[in-house]
Image (spheres, rainbow, N blue to C red):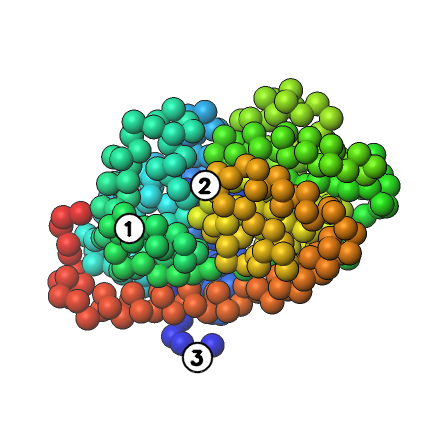
């Protein structure tokens, strides 16, 4: 490593083994930073299975409480003074605050008191999510809070150019782009399993229509039923089955709406990769993504992806070449794109091959190095600022 090693405090309300794009990304980034010689301290809520007596000098656990209506997500709670005491004893060079909940706010306040460099991440469309969880009236206030929060950090990292443009229109400043990668060795067409497909009731020539992700309102999963119906009506000679991998608050409702679909629950690691590779067509109707890691994972697994033209899909899919795109909210176009991919076997084969070739070039190493650059820049900026030299910034 050619750059000096840093002491980095990573603050997040989600982290592996929790299953979501933010947790997956943070796991990859922290692992990559450690491999490059940096010291990474993790501050996160306590998870199920954590040992209350465990001692890890690089792990700070705090109390967590579930998001209303979605216990799979939680906010962390720790006092600013707890973090002040710790960081006065073991002063980090730079903080990365990945989430803006109570834990992130306490970390931001403590960092400003100590004059620490702070980089933040904008990883979820919370103003849009709020409407799905009965908090629609708070959407504008939430946007104001997020803008206030991120203006107090050196740079806010976003995963896609479209997200950066959206935030700029909303008045956010000092935005940096940090894309996400995929492990193309793990997510690989070679993991395709005929035994797994047979357990789904499918033969070698049948079509597994796959969805991977949270089963939640913001994922726009109501589009799956009309899309599957259109595929079955257009291609009655083909045997199709919808396979959903993931869990969430809408699972029971979806099982009623889609009685013929197979619900596999949440999967991880090689088992998840095997599920991906055993599919054929991947439907991702979500319009609420800042990125959407599953798009790259599906492409790396050799699936033909149908997605809305935003976030990861807009960044990585060339319509008609390595996938198919539809404008967000255009249900007929989404359905037409899915039908087009199954029109000819050669089309499906070509798109799947091109998807794999593209995704196999989207590794994590370059992204970790770019992230490292943002952290060094923030630390250097803080080291030369008057507030940092005084060592205290009282207001937040």
Q: Is residue 230 above or below residue 389?
A: above
Residue 237 rendering spot, x and y as whole percentages = 83, 37
Front-lying residue, 257 or 360: 257
Note whether residue 184 is visible: no
Q: Nearer the viewer, mark 3 or mark 1?
A: 1
User: Disc 2 to disc 1, how far (Cα)?
Assistant: 17 Å
Q: Is residue 3 above or below residue 248?
A: below
The mark that comes first in sequence, 3 or 1, is: 3
Q: Is residue 355 left or right of residue 158?
A: right
Asked if marks 3 and 1 touch (Cβ < 8 Å), the reply is no
Could you say which quadrant of the image residue 133 lies in? top left
Residue 303 rendering spot, x and y as whole percentages = 69, 51
Asked if marks 2 and 1 touch (Cβ < 8 Å), the reply is no
Identified at 73% across, 55% down, the residue is 347
Could you say which quadrant of the image residue 243 lies in? top right
**Residue projecting furthest to the bottom:** 2
The mark that comes first in sequence, 2 or 3, is: 3
Q: Mark 3 highlights which residue?
A: 2
Front-lying residue, 199 or 328: 328
Residue 328 rendering spot, x and y as whole percentages = 48, 42
Could you say which quadrant of the image residue 38 lies in? bottom left
Identified at 34% across, 69% down, the residue is 376
How many numbered marks appear? Answer: 3
Residue 290 rendering spot, x and y as whole percentages = 44, 48
The mark that comes first in sequence, 2 or 1, is: 1
Q: Mark 1 highlights which residue?
A: 169
Front-lying residue, 387 or 340: 340
Asked if marks 2 and 3 touch (Cβ < 8 Å), the reply is no
Q: Mark 2 highlights which residue?
A: 288
């Amino acid at each position: 490593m050619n750059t000096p090693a840093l002491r980095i405090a990573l603050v997040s309300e989600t982290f592996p083994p929790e299953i979501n794009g933010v947790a997956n990304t943070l796991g990859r980034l922290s692992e990559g930073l450690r491999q490059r010689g940096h010291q990474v301290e993790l501050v996160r809520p306590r998870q199920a299975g954590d040992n209350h007596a465990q001692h890890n000098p690089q792990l700070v656990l705090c109390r967590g409480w579930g998001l209303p209506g979605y216990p799979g997500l939680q906010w962390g709670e720790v006092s600013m003074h707890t973090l002040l005491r710790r960081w006065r004893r073991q002063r980090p060079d730079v903080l990365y605050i990945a989430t803006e909940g109570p834990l992130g706010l306490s970390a931001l306040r403590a960092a400003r008191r100590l004059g620490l460099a702070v980089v933040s991440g904008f990883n979820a469309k919370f103003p849009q999510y709020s409407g799905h969880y009965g908090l629609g009236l708070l959407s504008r206030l939430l946007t104001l809070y997020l803008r206030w929060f991120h203006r107090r950090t050196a740079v806010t990292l976003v995963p896609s150019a479209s997200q950066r443009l959206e935030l700029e229109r909303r008045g956010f400043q000092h935005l940096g782009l940090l894309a996400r990668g995929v492990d193309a060795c793990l997510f690989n067409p070679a993991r395709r399993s005929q035994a797994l497909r047979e357990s789904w009731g499918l033969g070698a020539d049948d079509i597994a229509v796959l969805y991977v992700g949270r089963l939640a309102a913001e994922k726009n999963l109501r589009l799956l039923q009309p899309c599957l119906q259109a595929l079955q009506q257009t291609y009655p000679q083909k045997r199709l089955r919808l396979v959903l991998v993931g869990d969430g608050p809408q699972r029971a409702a979806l099982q009623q709406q889609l009685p013929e679909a197979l619900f596999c629950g949440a999967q991880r690691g090689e088992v998840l990769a095997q599920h991906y590779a055993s599919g054929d067509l991947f439907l991702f109707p979500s319009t609420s993504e800042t990125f959407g890691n599953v798009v790259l994972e599906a492409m790396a697994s050799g699936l033909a992806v149908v997605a809305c033209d935003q976030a990861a899909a807009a960044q990585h899919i060339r319509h008609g070449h390595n996938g198919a795109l539809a404008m967000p909210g255009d249900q007929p176009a989404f359905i037409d794109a899915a039908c087009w991919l199954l029109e000819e076997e050669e089309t499906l084969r070509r798109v799947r091959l091109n998807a794999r070739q593209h995704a196999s070039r989207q590794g994590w190493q370059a992204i970790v190095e770019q992230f490292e650059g943002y952290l060094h820049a923030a630390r250097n900026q803080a080291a030369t600022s008057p507030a940092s030299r005084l060592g205290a910034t009282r207001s937040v």
